[in-house]
């Protein structure tokens, strides 16, 4: 066994361990974020949130996960065959891949692809397919409505994301995330590109189907939108995928605009950069949770109007100005 | 857009002479009129022209035929009109749904409760009851409990019910 | 919304069933929606899931036994129903009501109106997707419901009025508690203004949605805040005053366009006016009896009577026909939600689904009142 391990190149072992850690991190993040969301929702609504299970509800999410695993997987009549079970898997599988390129700290990055940024944005768009297949194959009018809304919404909001990210690429001349973070050692890009940050953040909330853009899963209109017919582990796969996409969005915003792992040295020695990164990301996630519990939902045609008539023109103008300034 | 009560009374008298104006403090309405079934739609149209809104339509099971009551009121001037009419001998009555679209639901409800059929109603299907209960007619009283009209309304206001064309009371 | 959606070929249409169980029909209401994409082509509300035949109950037992029923129909704002019924009986039988009882009736009714509008506000915003304000409004309601529970004995279905007055007098803690409540509510209104009234998403969801004009109101018999949102200042408390309302000074708020936003503004302003009414009534309330003794068996003389009060949802009218016995011969309850709901079929053509939800929420429906 040891001789086999010694024969493998060290790179291979490193990647295998990293992949395992990443998958573990995905589930851990879903747990932490689910707990944060429920506690924060309680606090925003003048109540306590989960308190019973474990100390102040800390064990609530693991226990909920166990409960969901134990539930029966219901299959309604006339669902679209294999696609009904494939769509949660399609939602879950690409979710771990962007973690391979995000720089958690100068040494904690699995692979630094030259096109890391494009890779992440490509992976995020798998969400659309999964939601659409899930809603379509459920043989339920509510789910179909949710799926169609989600497709239109995700397609419309990918464009502002791309355009605002392009402004950063123009400044740094590179798609590689490590390079982008290294370029922010003197000042963070949010100071230079505030408009791009705002557009990216808002479009990111819309991409991940979070309130106030959560029409595909609008509870009071569509019962539960595209995941009405899923129960147990299938439902929790969609939820884990959603929380992970939120993390990826916030991590990307941190890397692109807030300096990644840069920060004043903390007394943790080598780990302080990783802690800075995680703190900034979770701060952005707190803001997203805050938005969800504060604002009412936008109507669907207003949502599309907002993207096509406001976000895209603003981000194009921003891109143009950036190009001019960089040239000069 | 205040209501001209004098003109309203004149228009109602054009439909039927059985009009009285009791004290509102005693009974809650200012004008009471008793019509025969064929005058109902004309009266409803003149109510609509005066801008009176439909408050409710209900029925009372008296012998020999049930009586249907309509109440109208006005938004700007305090005036409530109670319109009474007896159902025709075949259990039918013209519907005012073409004039007052809100009467649609009221008349369906009366059809559920009493079995009175409203002619000219767009879709007289059960409103409150399920299909299997549509013949239940719960508000019709048992024979020994039904009272004569004169036991309920001793006609103090001088209204007389118009001569009905069915067998006498 | 473009006209002509109804001309789409029939195989493009599909039916969405907002079934009796749904998060945003307020009660058991089934709405079968014919849709084209996101557009609503036609709806058919199906009611009757909560029908308990109150009117037959009114005709089968003595009139005193119907008093609890009046509270169960519109449970969110039960006291106007009680008031209308009790006034009808008092009109028929000529029972006098002491002045202190009238003031207590007015104070408790206005408290009930505030409670009902707070419930509506939370539920309306929940329909629109804001999950948090409902908990704030429910917290406000708790303070008022505690007072009402002390006075009437129940939190929701208050059975407090009798023919001839009210059941029991209030104790010494009532007035300070009510004054504290009024002060607290006034400060909360500012918070709601900042969070909701000026919120751009809320305005965009409710402005120019579900416009009701005067002609529609006449044809369907629309009353209450839904009517006043369209600019018609018709309030039974001012038009056909009853109880001690003529001696109290308050305004009737109206909107301008008749859309959902105006209905929201009207209800919030009505809550403020209710607080004004309660303050004045507390000042002017005299001492004395709260109930005139009526004989145990009080016959209703032959004849019929209607009596109308202003409920939180519109004009509540009771029609009682007596025949000389204790049992009413006919008892008709006119519920405002019934008339308000019937206009939904005409109102919703060519709306988006989200707009239909917002409109239904703004009509302030309580389905048990529709079904009786």
Image (spheres, coloured by chain):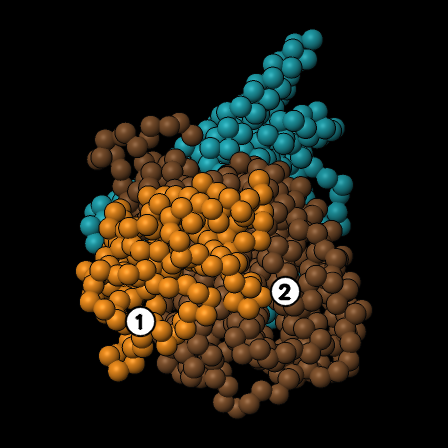
Crowd rating for badge 2 (residues with CA inside 10 Å; few <14, some 14–19, many 20+): some
Toward the viewer: C143 or A221?
C143
Residue A171 position, x and y percent, is: 63, 19
Q: Residue furthest top?
A: A328
| Numbered disc total | 2
Chain coloured brown: C
Crowd rating for badge 1 (residues with CA inside 10 Å; few <14, some 14–19, many 20+): many
Kindly report which numbered mark, 2 or 1, lies closer to the viewer in this rendering.
Answer: 1
User: What colour has chain A?
Assistant: cyan
Residue placed at 44% from the left, 45% from the top? B11
Residue placed at 28% from the left, 29% from the top? C7
SS type, badge 2: loop
Chain coloured orange: B
Q: In which quarter of the view is residue C160 placed? A: bottom right
Residue B148 position, x and y percent, is: 31, 75
Q: Say if A119 sits above or below A53 in the image.
A: above
Residue A40, label in figure: none
Residue B62, label in figure: 1
Q: Residue under circle 2?
A: C242
The answer to whether residue A267 of the structure is visible from this angle is yes
Residue placed at 67% from the left, 35% from the top? A258
- The chain letter under disc 2 is C
Residue A281 position, x and y percent, is: 62, 43
Marks 2 and 1 sit apart, C-alpha to C-alpha, by 31 Å
Q: Is residue C151 left or right of residue A306?
A: right
- The chain letter under disc 1 is B
Q: Say if C78 sits above or below A100 in the image.
A: below
Q: Is residue A39 left or right of residue C301?
A: right
SS type, badge 1: strand
């Amino acid at each position: 066994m040891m001789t086999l391990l010694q024969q493998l190149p060290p790179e291979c072992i490193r990647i295998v361990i990293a992949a395992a850690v990443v998958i573990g991190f995905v589930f851990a993040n879903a747990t932490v974020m689910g707990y944060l969301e429920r506690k924060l929702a309680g606090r925003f609504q003048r109540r306590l949130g989960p308190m019973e299970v474990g100390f102040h509800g800390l064990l609530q999410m693991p226990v909920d996960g166990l409960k969901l695993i134990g539930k029966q997987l219901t299959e309604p009549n006339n669902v679209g065959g294999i696609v009904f079970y494939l769509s949660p898997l399609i939602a879950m599988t690409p979710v771990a891949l962007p973690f391979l390129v995000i720089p958690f700290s100068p040494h904690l990055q699995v692979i630094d692809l030259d096109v890391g940024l494009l890779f992440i944005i490509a992976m995020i768009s798998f969400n659309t397919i999964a939601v659409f297949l899930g809603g379509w194959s459920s043989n339920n009018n509510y789910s179909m409505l949710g799926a169609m809304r989600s497709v239109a919404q995700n397609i419309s909001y990918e464009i502002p994301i791309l355009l605002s990210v392009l402004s950063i690429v123009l400044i740094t001349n590179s798609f590689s995330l490590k390079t982008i973070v290294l370029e922010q050692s003197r000042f963070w890009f949010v100071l230079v590109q505030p408009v791009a940050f705002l557009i990216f953040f808002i479009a990111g909330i819309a991409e991940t189907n979070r309130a106030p853009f959560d029409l595909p899963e609008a509870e009071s209109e569509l019962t539960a939108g595209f995941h009405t017919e899923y129960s147990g582990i299938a439902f929790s796969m969609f939820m884990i995928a959603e929380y992970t996409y939120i993390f990826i969005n916030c991590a990307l915003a941190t890397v692109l605009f807030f300096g990644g792992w840069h920060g004043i040295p903390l007394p943790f020695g080598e780990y302080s950069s990783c802690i800075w990164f995680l703190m900034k990301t979770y701060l952005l996630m707190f803001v997203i949770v805050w938005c969800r519990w504060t604002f009412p939902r936008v109507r669907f045609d207003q949502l599309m109007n907002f993207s096509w008539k406001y976000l895209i023109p603003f981000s194009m103008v921003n891109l143009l100005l950036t190009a001019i300034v960089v040239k000069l | 857009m205040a209501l001209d009560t004098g003109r309203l009374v004149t228009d109602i008298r054009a439909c039927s002479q059985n009009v009285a104006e009791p004290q509102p403090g005693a009974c809650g309405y200012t004008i009471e009129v008793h019509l025969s079934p064929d005058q109902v739609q004309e009266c409803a149209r003149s109510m609509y022209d005066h801008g009176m809104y439909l408050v409710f339509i209900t029925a009372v099971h008296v012998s020999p035929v049930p009586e249907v009551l309509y109440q109208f009121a006005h938004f700007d001037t305090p005036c409530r009109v109670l319109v009474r009419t007896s159902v025709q001998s075949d259990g039918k009555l013209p519907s005012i749904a073409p004039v007052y679209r809100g009467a649609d639901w009221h008349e369906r409800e009366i059809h559920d409760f009493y079995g009175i059929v409203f002619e000219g109603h767009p879709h007289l299907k059960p409103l409150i009851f399920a299909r299997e209960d549509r013949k239940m007619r719960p508000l019709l009283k048992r024979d020994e409990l039904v009272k004569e009209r004169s036991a309920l309304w001793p006609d103090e206001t001088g209204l007389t019910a118009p001569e009905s064309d069915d067998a006498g009371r | 919304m473009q006209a002509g959606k109804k001309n789409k070929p029939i195989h493009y249409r599909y039916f969405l069933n907002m079934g009796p169980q749904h998060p945003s029909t307020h009660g058991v209401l089934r709405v079968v929606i014919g849709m084209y994409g996101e557009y609503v082509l036609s709806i058919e509300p199906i009611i009757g899931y909560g029908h308990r035949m109150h009117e037959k109950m009114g005709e089968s037992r003595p009139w005193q036994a119907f008093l609890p029923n009046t509270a169960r129909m519109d449970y969110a704002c039960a006291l106007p129903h009680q008031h209308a019924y009790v006034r009808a009986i008092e009109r028929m039988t000529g029972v006098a009501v002491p002045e202190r009882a009238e003031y207590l009736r007015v104070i408790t009714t206005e408290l009930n109106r505030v409670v009902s509008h707070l419930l509506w506000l939370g539920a309306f915003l929940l329909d629109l997707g804001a999950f948090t304000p409902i908990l704030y409004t429910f917290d406000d309601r708790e303070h008022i419901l505690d007072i009402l529970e002390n006075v009437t004995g129940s939190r929701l279905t208050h059975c407090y009025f009798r023919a001839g007055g009210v059941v029991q007098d209030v104790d010494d803690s009532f007035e300070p508690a009510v004054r504290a409540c009024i002060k607290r509510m006034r400060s909360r209104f500012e918070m709601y203004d900042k969070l909701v009234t000026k919120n751009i998403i809320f305005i965009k969801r409710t402005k120019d949605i579900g416009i009701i004009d005067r002609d529609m109101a006449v044809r369907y018999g629309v009353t209450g805040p839904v009517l006043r949102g369209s600019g018609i200042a018709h309030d039974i408390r001012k038009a056909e005053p009853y109880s001690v309302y003529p001696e109290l000074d308050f305004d009737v708020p109206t909107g301008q366009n008749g859309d959902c936003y105006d209905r929201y503004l009207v209800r919030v302003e009505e809550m403020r006016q209710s607080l004004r009414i309660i303050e004045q009534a507390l000042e002017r309330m005299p001492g004395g009896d709260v109930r005139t003794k009526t004989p145990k068996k009080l016959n209703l003389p032959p004849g019929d009577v209607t009596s109308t009060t202003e409920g939180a949802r519109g004009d509540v009218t009771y029609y009682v026909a007596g025949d000389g016995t204790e049992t009413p011969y006919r008892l008709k309850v006119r519920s405002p939600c019934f008339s308000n709901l019937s206009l939904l079929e005409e109102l919703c053509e060519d709306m988006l689904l989200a707009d239909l939800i917002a409109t239904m929420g703004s009509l302030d429906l309580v389905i048990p009142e529709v079904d009786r």
